Image (cartoon, rainbow, N blue to C red):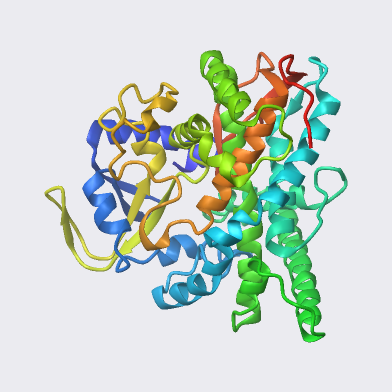
Amino acid sequence: LWRMLRKREFMHDLFLQWAEKYGPIVRLNAFHRVSVMILSPEGVKEFLMSPQYPKDRLVYGRIFNLFGERFLGNGLVTVYNHEHWHKQRKIMDPAFSRTYLIGLMETFNEKAEELMEKLEEKADGKKEFSMLLMMNRVTMDIIAKIAFGLELNALSDDRTPFPHAVSVVLEGMTKARIPLFQYMPGKQKLVKEVRESLRLLRRVAKECIDRRREAIQNGKEATLDILTQILKGDDDENILDNFITFFVAGHETTANQLSFTVMALAQHPEILERLQAEVDDVLGAKRDIGYEDLGKLTYLSQVLKESLRLYPPVPGTVRWMEKEHVINGIRIPANTTLVFSTYIMGRMERYFKDPLTFNPDRFSRDAPKPYYCYFPFSLGPRSCIGQVFAQMEAKVVMAKLLQRFEFQLVPGQSFKLMEAGTIRPLDGVMCKLKPRRSARGCQA
């Protein structure tokens, strides 16, 4: 595993082989620690649906700091104490209510439209560009505006330091798993860059928080957004932790999902054609997508879900089990780290027929629902607070892209996956675009 980490090899496929050979309960020995991979629906249900199994302090502690600089700290994703987590989650919930999310459609449309303008500049059928890079920038602009009221302009301003800073930090997250990485020869440059990037992110977060506090003190009415809710926390460092958590987790994962979806559609022209027909049928030439349109884009929902099955940006989650337990007839000793992987279960033949085939009909209304073997947003009380937000955003961006453009993949690129904090496409999904012939002139 250490060798694979050092060589940036994708280790989840090795775990998948072990799961098929030894599963559904697999013991892992890595870096002098024993973990147990739970790959049975019963185990997933039992451990993830219950609040009594906290996140593993040691695993999530690794992203509290990175190389001595505070990163996610005790934010919503990393906090392992259930009471602390529950208090934070209750504060954050109003910023993810259905009513509030419906009100975000205007920003989703506005920022997705800015992306379309940028893509139009490239749509000559010849220019090659990274879809991942473009998706990263639009999702970053969306989360900055919606969560914090910030106009980041990552799409229009190539000099903005944020995309690079986040990328460096996520690389640092992966490298920090290698014991003594920061003391290895030739690694000081990256370690220094990670520390500087973290300082930049936390400095900007603090400026943004101070500005909002000042506005509220001056009697300005507080917008109901993520920042307003974060400010209800009682510890300044923790407020910064949550700012960074939402900023990083709130854009990177969706950008990866969108890029993987473009990749899968370009590889399956018949699915792409069926999806374009649905988009044309629901949207026609309409420029602004309404909330009610999202519910009609049912095949697009299926495509996005299938993309998350094969290419989940977050491969899984980890829990800590204090007491001895028997699962699937196997005794697991007390004080054990439990690993759950939606990536592995999503690719296992026993749960999905022809698992490596991209088939959105698995998620059609009449198909049987996956039973505790598909959890791209985790499950239970610690499931992702932003999952509805993320899928609304993904639908708006994808629908506009499908409405306006034909895309093809640049030949010769690798479609391998890499892990850099999240699972992303190694070569960034290099594409060429052309305007769609059937795309009628869009109306306001």
Q: Tell me: 199 left or right of 47.
A: right
Q: x, y (%) of residue 221?
A: 75, 77
* Residue 408 at x, y percent in the picture: 67, 17
Q: Residue at x 79, y 84 (%)?
A: 219
> Across the whole image, how many numbered discs are drawn on residues?
0
Near-viewer residue (197 or 366): 366
Residue 190 drawn above or below residue 244: above
Q: Nearer the viewer, residue 17 or 202?
A: 202
Q: Is residue 20 above or below residue 27?
A: above
Residue 403 found in image quarter: top right
Figure quadrant of the N terminus? top left
Image quarter (top left, top right, bottom left or bottom right) of the C terminus = top right
| Front residue of this view, candidates 423 and 30 | 423
Left or right: 8 in relation to 331: right
- Residue nearest the observer in this picture, 419 or 442: 442
Kindly identify the residue that appears in the image at 43 percent across and 35 percent down. Answer: 309
Q: Residue at x 64, y 49 (%)?
A: 251
Residue 256's x, y, as percent?
Answer: 60, 39
- Residue 415 visible at all: no
Q: Is residue 437 above or below residue 157?
A: above
Decide if residue 39 is on the left or right side of residue 94.
left
Q: Residue at x 31, y 38 (%)?
A: 369
Answer with left or right where residue 297 lies relative to residue 182.
left
**Residue 360 screen position, x and y as percent:** 44, 27
Q: Is residue 407 visible?
A: yes
